[in-house]
Amino acid sequence: MASAYLFQCAGADGVVIANTAGSLGGNDGRGVPHCPSGGTWTLIEYAEPAQAFNPADLDPAILAEAFGAGLVVVGTGMVIAWAIKAVIRQVRGSF
């Protein structure tokens, strides 16, 4: 498994900030971001994932069940709202 490296800023306040685009404030004039709160940069090695996410690997039966469950949840709420609306119309119309 391949290794990758990440620079993190361990600030003096204990907050760890990853060196990602836009996560740190200014730089030192050479394009190098500075670590806020007087912290220090540390180099962290981590293992890259074995493979990237591929939607083709998902089981179609499980996807169909999840889609159906979502429709039931949304549909139930819509039917309840429709029924409440009908009851309110009946009550308003009877006075």
Image (spheres, rainbow, N blue to C red):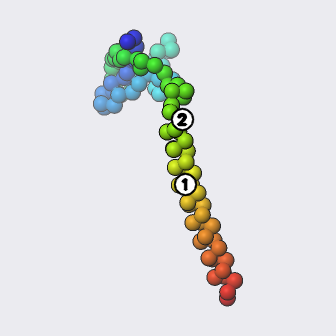
Q: Position of residue 75 (x, y in %)?
A: 58, 57
Outermost residue toward the front in this view: 61
The image quadrant of residue 33 is top left
Q: Helix, strand or loop at disc 2? A: helix
Q: Is the residue 1 above or below the residue 16 in the image? A: above
Q: CA distance from mark 2 to mark 1?
A: 18 Å
Residue 25 seen in this snapshot: no
**How far across and how far down the image is residue 85, in percent?**
63, 71
Mark 1 Cα shell of 10 Å, populated few (<14), some (14-19), many (≥20): few
Image height check: is 64 above or below 51? below
Residue at x 55%, y 60% (from the top left corner): 76
Q: Which mark is residue 72?
A: 1
> Which amino acid does the dot numbered 2 rest on?
Pro
Residue at the image position 50 percent from the left and 33 percent from the top: 59
Front residue of 59 and 84: 59
Residue 89 image offset from top left, x and y in percent: 67, 77
Q: Is residue 75 above or below residue 8?
A: below
**Quadrant where the image shows the C terminus:** bottom right
Q: Which residue is mark 2?
A: 60
Image quarter where the N terminus lies is top left
Q: Amino acid at mark 1?
A: Val
Residue 56 is marked as: none
Give the percent coordinates (x, y) of residue 94: 67, 86
Circle 2 packing at 10 Å, graded few (<14), some (14-19), many (20+), is few
- Identity of the residue drawn at 57% across and 51% down: 71
Asked if residue 92 lies left or right of residue 44, the reply is right
Q: Earlier in the sequence, mark 2 or mark 1?
A: 2
